[in-house]
Image (tube, grey):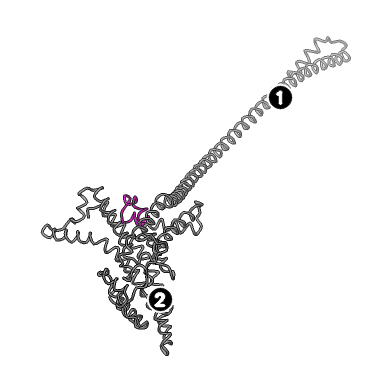
Amino acid sequence: MADPTKVDPIHQFALTDIVPLGEFSFTNSSLFMVLTTGLIGAYLIMSTQKRAMVPNRLQLVSEMLYEFVANMVSDSAGKAGMKFFPFVFSLFMFVLVANLFGMIPFFFTVTSHIIVTFALAMLVFIVVVVYGFWKNGFGFLRLFVPSGVPIYILPLVAVIEVISFLSRPISLSVRLFANILAGHITLKVFAGFIVSMGGLGWFALLTPLPLILTIGITALEFLVAVLQAYVFALLTSMYINDAIHPGH
Amino acid sequence: MAGLTQDIIIVAQADSLQEGVVAPANEQAAEAGEHATDTHATTEAHGGEEAHSAAFPPFDPSGFAGQLLWLAITFGALYLLMSRVALPQIGSIIDTRRARIEGDLAEAERLRKETEKAAAAYEAALAEARKNAQAIAEETRVSIKADIDNRRADVEAGLTTRISEAEARIAATKTAALANVDEIAADTAQAVVARVTGDATLEEARDAVAIVNRG
């Protein structure tokens, strides 16, 4: 931006080439994907390198993350779901760290682009469908036929189940994307008010208002960043449970 | 979402007013309008500044392929890193610790049982020893008593024999003495008689003593 006082809440989502490679340029988005993977890998591996019987703080954080996701997967998908534990853990950590990177000023938020969240959601969807059919054969289709439903409304229920199943990747991806996008725009708009009001004579006296709001929203956005990663991982575990146990 | 987009529109419009830029006149924005039919209306008012496109960036399809490629690379790398290195490492730490704790608890339980067994054995030994001690004391007391009784019986028997021997000796001595008395008496009597009457035989004196003795 040429003028630093100009408020542009959309600019933060723009892709800029770092290494131009045409269609597949290494952009700021790619950079933060690499940083996300790098940080997660480096932290988890290095903090647990000593394999201490009594963990220090860094190792304890890694172990807590591990047990948190492990409990989530085994609670929702049972013992059989644990073979998807690395998958769910990777998703959780990727979304969590990408969201939290987005909270640092001037950092790009990978999860604010619908294509990224949609790709992750489609990956979950494909894993569930492929594993569901591979494990249960056509028995996987029982997922759409809830037991205990009267036969005359069963077709209707089955159609609704199919639609809700097919809309999962959309709801999963839009939930994450919209939360992050809306949060970042709101934050930027309110922060922008501080600057714009500062240049409006007597209105400048009111600038603490948007400042307080901005601080509040920042705290809220940290919560959203963590919560959305949790929701994404939790829903993934529950969808995986559907693939393992299709009968309701 | 609806409220937010209104905010965006307001801010976006305020921006363009401040700058005095008429967005649609911008060539890039017009181009964006062509292919961004499904993108956000607000972005058109904005005017493109970026190399990629003027469309609302999160919906801009021109960035999709690149992001998908890099997401596949980074997420794939993350998955491999997690499933091959990080998670087995953390998992083994947790399992080792759990096994260690369970092992220690089992060991503690085993030692506790052992202690209880030892305490019970000690109690039993103590009771046994007490019983033995009583038996030994009793036995010793009895044997000492028997020993004392034996010795007393021996001593008493010895004393009795010696008393009776002594009595016999006394009786013999007495008898002998008495016999001597008679002899002396007879001699004396003969002497007396001889002095008085002139003669008397020793036999007559002895008879007279015997008569006196009998008398």
Quick check: A6 left or right of A119? right
> From the viewer's perspective, is residue B115 above or below residue A19?
above
Q: Residues within 10 Å of mark 2 (few under 14, many from 20)?
A: few
Residue shown at 40% from the left, 84% from the top: A197
Chain ID of residue with mark 1: B
Q: What residue is at 36 percent from the left and 80 percent from the top?
A: B15
Quadrant for the N terminus of chain A in the image? bottom left
User: Which residue position is annotated with label 2?
Assistant: A216
Q: Along the line of sight, which residue is nearer the eye, A79 or B47?
A: B47
Q: x and y percent of residue A199 in the render? A: 42, 86
Dominant secondary structure (helix, strand or loop) of the stretch shown in magenta: helix
**Horizontal relation, residue A132 to residue A218: left or right:** left
Instruction: Provide the residue designation for mark 1.
Output: B163
Q: Please state if A39 lies on the left or on the right of A132 as rendered.
A: right
Residue at 31% in and 69% down: A178
Q: Nearer the viewer, mark 2 or mark 1?
A: 2
Magenta residue span: A70-88
Q: Chain for mark 2?
A: A
**Image point 22% across, 59% down: which residue?**
A166
Q: Please, is residue B4 above or below residue B142 in the view? A: below
Q: Label 1 amino acid?
A: Ile
